[in-house]
Image (cartoon, helix red, strand yellow):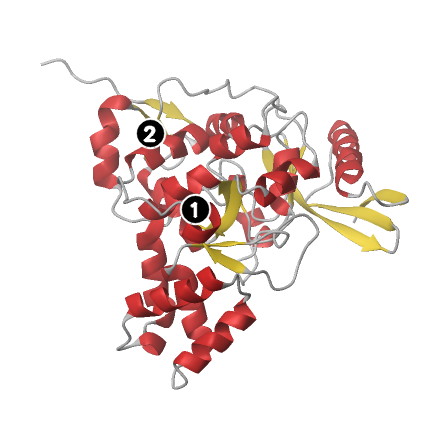
Amino acid sequence: MDRKPDPEVLDNRALGRATLARQLLLRRHAMTATEAMEHLVGLQGQLANPPYLGLWSRLSTFAITDLTELLTSRKAVRGGLMRGTLHVVTARDFLRLRPVLQPVHDKAQRGFFRRDTEGMDLGELAAFCASVLDERYSTNVELRKALAAKWPERNATSLLHSVQYLLPTVYVPPGGTWGTGGSTPLATVDSWLGTPLPESDGPSQMILRYLAAFGPASVKDIQAWSGLTRLKQPVDELRPKLLTFRSAESGVELFDLPDAPRPDAGTPAPVRFLPEFDNLLVAHADRTRVISDEHRAITNTRNGGVAATVLVDGKVAGRWRLVRAKKAVTLEIEPFAPFATSDRKQVLAEGEALLAFAGEDAQERDVRFV
């Protein structure tokens, strides 16, 4: 019996280049915002501005109005998906993904609020809030008041958060669009999109799309990105369609699509400014292909935040933030180590381009290394 050949070994640099290619970060692409969002399987959207910045970093032509118009026309939505966190995705992707990911949301509700909802009919809770939201889009404050009136003996805040896991909802624009903040009205998916959620067709298609956007990757990587568990069996069922590799550093088995790009490890990677919570930094269990554990401890905050970061030669090399004051905006860049002269020039040039996009209304713009 012929021995099956050992899988090709990929080191972190090769994995990083492959993932940067999938994430549209080796060059800017001539895609529409819709095409990019569907290729990336959405953009992390805890805050309003990061999805815009993420698209700007990846597309050759992108304007703030491109994404805002998709959200206001209901062609894109902002709602809970992977890991139970907010994402901006196309409307059709929300309908595809949320049924598959509903177990993640159910588990989160039990983990956080089981005690405060003990003995309740959670179906009744979700149906009550659906009726409230279908009658009138409501903010969290308004929905909490309705819950307190219905169940005065319960913790209304816990009920509110439970509903946001149990009931598929989306945020109503202009909330969640560029430059907005504060309390944003919620709507049920049925009422906002006019289409009920379908039944889940299982995770297989989602796994293939994940590999197209983030591979090569392990089962644990797919689980870390999605929030789902026990994905070994569905990945094994897909094995005949996939290539397998092995990580040089960890020895872990990695899976990938046969026709997905895997550039040479020496491929140049341009400087890029990534927003808070960018997909690239939250999509793997082992993230050392793009960020060292030492730097991850700096960029990740105790409350689950992920800082805006600078990529130099394909790896996170610093943090950045925009500081606004009256009609001026300053881009503050904090390198983790001094940049080489050539890298500093590229960082400065990309930073000035970022300021022109994000601070176009400012009369004064400045880049500062801190």
Q: CA distance from mark 2 to mark 1?
A: 37 Å
Q: Nearer the viewer, mark 2 or mark 1?
A: 1
Q: Position of residue 255 (x, y in %)?
A: 33, 29
For label 2, the crowd category at 10 Å Cα-Cα, with few meaning under 14, some 14 to 19 and many 20 or more, is many
Residue at the top extreme?
Answer: 2
Q: Quadrant of the N terminus?
A: top left
Q: Position of residue 323 (x, y in %)?
A: 79, 53
Residue 155 in sight in this render: no
Residue at the front extreme?
Answer: 135
**In the rendered view, would you say 254 is above or below 331?**
above
**In the rendered view, would you say 348 is above or below 332?**
above
Residue 337 in sight in this render: yes
Q: Mark 1 highlights which residue?
A: 194
Q: Mark 2 highlights which residue?
A: 255
Report the side of 62 relative to 101 (left or right). Answer: right
Q: Which SS class for mark 2? A: strand
Report the side of 44 relative to 167 (left or right). Answer: right
Which amino acid, by three-letter code, is at mark 2?
A: Phe
Q: Position of residue 366 (x, y in %)?
A: 86, 43
Report the side of 73 relative to 150 (left or right). Answer: right
Residue 259 occupies quadrant: top left
